[in-house]
Amino acid sequence: MKYVFIAVGGSGTKVAESLVSLLAIGFPIRVSQSSAPEAREKITAEFTSYGDTLEIWRLDPDGSSGAADALQNCVDAYQKLQGHLGSGWALEIDPVIRHLDPLHLPQAAPTDNQVKTLEGILCSNYGKDPSDPFMRLFYEPKDLEVKIDRGFYQKPFIGAAIMAVFAESLKDENSDGGSKCRLNHHESLDVRFLLCGSLHGGTGACGVPIMGKYLKDRKKEKDLNKWRIGACLLAPYNLPPQPPFGQLQDDEQLTNALVMDRLRAYANEKAFAGLAIEEQKELTKQILLGFYANPEDMIARTRQGLLYYQDHASDCFDELYILGKPEPDQLPTWSNGGKSQNNPLNSAEAVAALSALDFFSSVDVERKGYLIGTSTQTLDSHKMHISDLPHYKVAGVSIDPEKAFLATAILYHALLHQIPWDEKARNWNNVIAGLKNYYHDDEDRKQADAAHYREAAALIANFIAATVFPNRALGWSEEDASVLRKFLSNDEHVYRDISHKMEKKGLFNDRAKEPLQLRVASIEVSAMEFGKWCPAGDQFTRGTYLRHVWSRLFTKE
Amino acid sequence: MFGMYLFQGLDSILRFVASNRDIDNWQDAAFNWLIAAVVISIVCVGLMVVIKFIIKQRAPNIRRRVWSRSRTIVFILVGFFPVLLITSLIWYFSRDFVNIVGVGGLLKGILFSWLLYTMFMLIWHSFGEWRRDIF
């Protein structure tokens, strides 16, 4: 199975980052059969994501956004993790993120589509007919003239026209977008496309329905029954702060003097840092003309977006996920795109990533409709617990995200602190028979693998921290993080308590002294039980070993 | 012929063990001393094996259950002490052993018990899971 995650705009990009993190942490999307020598039934079902591939497309005119850099770093870390573990841990993610720039359009002449404004694109000579008469009817001059190479500034009506031209260009495999998407190649494959973007923004609000409609039309036209198209729409969950200064009043005119005046007064603001003087002027103009994400407009724009889906776009999708926060989190810094738009991950993005996993893992191809997650009345969306995350199903089994996090945290601790890597493998006894047999005659291999495991574990710990630790991500409770920190600690004084709980109960009782708990989820496993888990010899790679142990931990009560 | 060699061999061993051969039936006392040394070494091997089994079984985690070669050697060496103690006590509480075997025979008997004990312990560690503790 191939999955294509189409991240539209900044929010979609952050959800893609969260999705990659969850996959690195070990979240499964399918079940595979595994033979376990120590298991009585010999063949066990193993929860995994390994065996499938994921491609990430990023549809955003803002090619230099900080969110895109963060996503690329995240995918690079994922590749590193895969490199350390070999095959078997998690699905393959194409390391090349397809950056689809909706402003990079086909040209009939070299001067076509070069001016990155709405007017510049739509009045390009490339079109069949001149658009100018219509544009003047629908848009104000400032809408036509604003530079849109950093997004559509919460104005989907600007982006919609561009997105429509871009979607049309995908039919041509020689166009920039067409060559990156390779839809002809995908026509023969079993593919699940999930589009993700915000309802209240600019790029997401216009890009998701238009791309969804394009894919649906193509599916219908070519009878591509193996395609499934879903979308995840994010209502406001982050509130940007107000810009450094306000926009022009109705009776004020934009003049160069005013721009320079504002620029002089606010050039030291963080939003202007690192920008060339021309970029600073352009940003000042955008703020003065009101081309920025205004927190006061977000709810109204979301409402408009939902109405649009209700009337025109919901039919484009086999499944539609809608989520948001009753009380959005306040972002620390203001940004209007570019490198400075580098927000931390948010708990709402983790929920959106889980909806992607739900869509990818769904076996019921007939399932259709809206999926609106509901939360308990006691949920504090500023301080969510991992146990508040929605469950999804893999092969009919409910996947509890809290238990998945706990299984990975235990795996980290057991792998690094319960296996006697410093002892020679020949001295290991039958309590870790599987690993002992594998490393028995090859101490060098054991040492090399131990180093790989340490590196991989550090990367996994970093993925966990970036996803749910409140000092690195917004909207999480410190309570869960403090428990997870104990599992992920390499300080013996800190993890001693966990090791103690994993000790065996009695002389002839190998069960654990106490269960290990996060908040609600718990797993009772002793070091002795953990030691016995190992995949069959001919299947052994570092990744398959970890996946086997993870799956055993996850399914343990 | 073989029986004669065996008798001569045993006789010389008994002579080696008995310090005072002027007392009647010194051969019986010397023979009993040898048998005692064998029994003591076997009992001590049994004792140490049971102790090691319990220590290993009580180990709460994998790390504590893995024994290094040096730890195993130290454990075997610790077993020398009960061998020494039991041998000395048995020698001390038997007038025949004190009179016939004497101090020289006691030292030879301890040495013999230690040798047997070490041999039996190594044999025990040659099979199964414990093999990796030392070999």
Image (cartoon, rainbow, N blue to C red):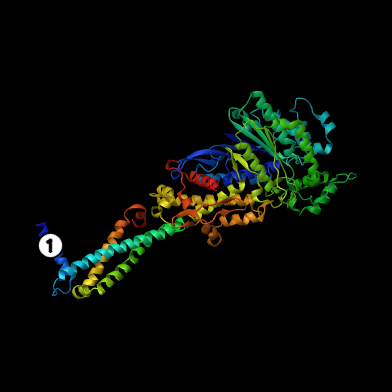
Residue A347, how many percent across, how many down?
A: 68, 48
Name the chain letter of the residue that bears numbered label 1: B
Residue A549, image x, y percentages: 50, 47
Residue B22 horizontal/vertical position (percent): 13, 75
Q: A294 or A508: which is nearer to us?
A: A508
Residue extending furthest toward the right: A251
Say few, some or many: other residues with alpha carbon within 10 Å of mark 1 (under 14 / 14 to 19 / 20 or more). Answer: few
Which of B129/A327 is in front? B129
Image quadrant in which the N terminus of chain B is located: bottom left
Q: Is residue A375 left or right of residue A27?
A: right
Q: Position of residue A17 (x, y in %)?
A: 64, 44
Label 1 sits on what residue type? Answer: Phe
Q: Which residue is mark 1?
A: B7
* Residue A291 seen: no
Tell which of A117 and A435 is nearer to you.
A435
Relative vertical location of residue A237 with respect to residue B38 in this rendering, above or below? above
Q: Is residue A529 left or right of residue A347?
A: left
In screen coordinates, is B60 left or right of A389? left
Quadrant of the rendered image containing residue A313: top right
Q: Which residue is at 77% across, 46% downward?
A: A283
Q: Secondary structure at mark 1?
A: helix
The answer to whether residue A486 is above or below residue A43 is below
Direction left: furthest residue:
B1
Name the quadrant of the C terminus of chain B.
bottom left
Q: How many marks?
A: 1
Q: Is residue A502 visible?
A: yes
Left or right, residue A245 beside residue A104: right
Give the quadrant of residue A68: top right
Q: Is residue A475 above or below residue A373?
A: below
